[in-house]
Amino acid sequence: MRDGLHIGLDTSVPGLVVKIGNYPLHHGGVGAIRSLGRLGVPMYALTEDRWTPAARSRYLREAFVWPTTGCEPAERLVDGLLAAARRLRGPAVLFPTDEEAAVLVAEHHEELRPHFLLPPVDPGLPRRLASKQALYELCVEHGVPAPVSTAPQTYAEVEWFASRARFPVVAKNREAYLRRARPAVPGTTRVSGPRELLALARGWGDRPGVVLQEYLPPRFAEDWIVHACFGADGEPRAVFTGVKVRSWPPHAGMTAAACTVDNPELAYLSAQFVKQIGYAGIADMDWRFDRRDGRYKLLDFNPRTGAQFRMFESTTGVDVVRAQHLELTGRTVPAGEQREGRRYVVEHVDAAARLAYLGRGRRDYRPRDLPAGRTGGTELAWAAADDPLPAAVALARLARPGARHLWQLWRGSRGTHR
């Protein structure tokens, strides 16, 4: 195990990985546990049961079993966090790995602050950033390019939009971070024409909870990722850029494979936007470069640790999770350049994505300036020689329901686009 002192970590301060909802196969939490645990930081996590991949990591001191659905009252969820705090020795750095947790922590900052180390962020800002509609409004307010979006309030407004819009368009759940028993759309959904849109809208009720967005065709676009950690002054403590090579469902979902590509222009755009809105903490942003007008357009701003953050590391050994721990414990984040040529692969998801791209005549993503030689190695989401159990547990949990789930995603992806 490498000593965390080489980058200045305070290994007396533990970290707590927090997510809300029943989805045990979450590789972002495993990455956070490994990132700090390998350097000697005591790591803890809230898990659905004792046989999740995160719970079986050798770098986890203890799993606090706390099943949630994401539909509980906020007060109950806060009580759960406070119960975890009582089991820790002193304040811990919190690492939300989904939007529900990030919004909850921000909105209950005052109650949680005596027990956890938290970035000083406006309590209402993470909710706005996680909302598709509110994020677009923030982009318009601050002059940041984004796909043109509208949020119809009634079925009549959907009809008006359908009569005038240029199709195809993209439909997204307006508050995508909220877990619902019956979301308006299953995910980012490509809508081909007015008839299809109106047929969908009949199931949305009196107040459609959707955003209808300009469609950016994959053949004219490049998908970029920015992961960063910002201090209370709005300045980046670490900022990294990369490209999404493949996603699942194709061009419409989570990252299946990605690689690092240094992009100073995009790093600057991201940092400027964060400073304008007054955000602090870890951010995971998705941008799409539109070749038609030569602009980067902001698609998503996740105010938390991104699942694929471990693809990024600086020459001083810093990633965004390590930068957050350093920042919140009053340490200096050592400066360093982004390590180039690193790849990140989510094994089981990328296997399906490769087949999908080939089977549908789609090439995987090749940006113009992708380095020809990749010397930075490959980081796998699950498999690690020094921590083998998370991969074994993930494989076991995927064995039976996984094939059926991937088949359902494949079928559902035929009408989706991100």
Image (cartoon, helix red, strand yellow):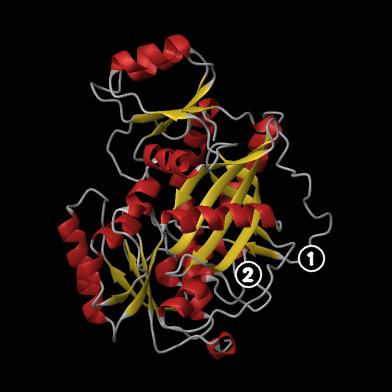
Give the secondary structure at mark 1: loop
Instruction: Say whether residue 259 is visible.
Output: no
Q: Nearer the viewer, residue 136 or 378?
A: 136
Are the two marked residues, 2 and 1, in contact with CB atoms closer than 8 angstroms? Answer: no
Which quadrant of the structure image shows residue 377?
bottom right
Read off the residue under disc 2: 313
Residue 255 rendering spot, x and y as whole percentages:
57, 48
Task: Inspect the image, locate mark 2, and give the three-letter code of the amino acid beneath it.
Answer: Glu
Task: Inspect the image, locate mark 1, and give the three-letter code of the amino acid beneath it.
Answer: Thr
226 relative position to 324: left or right: right
Residue 225 rendering spot, x and y as whole percentages:
59, 51
Q: Quadrant of the N terminus?
A: bottom right
- Residue under the image location 32 percent in, 33 percent down: 183
Whole-angstrom CA distance, mark 2 to mark 1, is 14 Å
Read off the residue under disc 1: 375
Which quadrant of the structure image shows residue 238?
bottom right
Crowdedness near tag 1: few (<14), some (14–19) or many (≥20) residues, C-alpha within 10 Å: few
Residue 327 rendering spot, x and y as whole percentages:
46, 77
User: Where 68 sits versus 207, above or below?
Assistant: below
- Residue under the image location 55 percent in, 38 percent down: 249
Q: Nearer the viewer, residue 307 or 358?
A: 307
Q: Quadrant of the C terminus?
A: top right
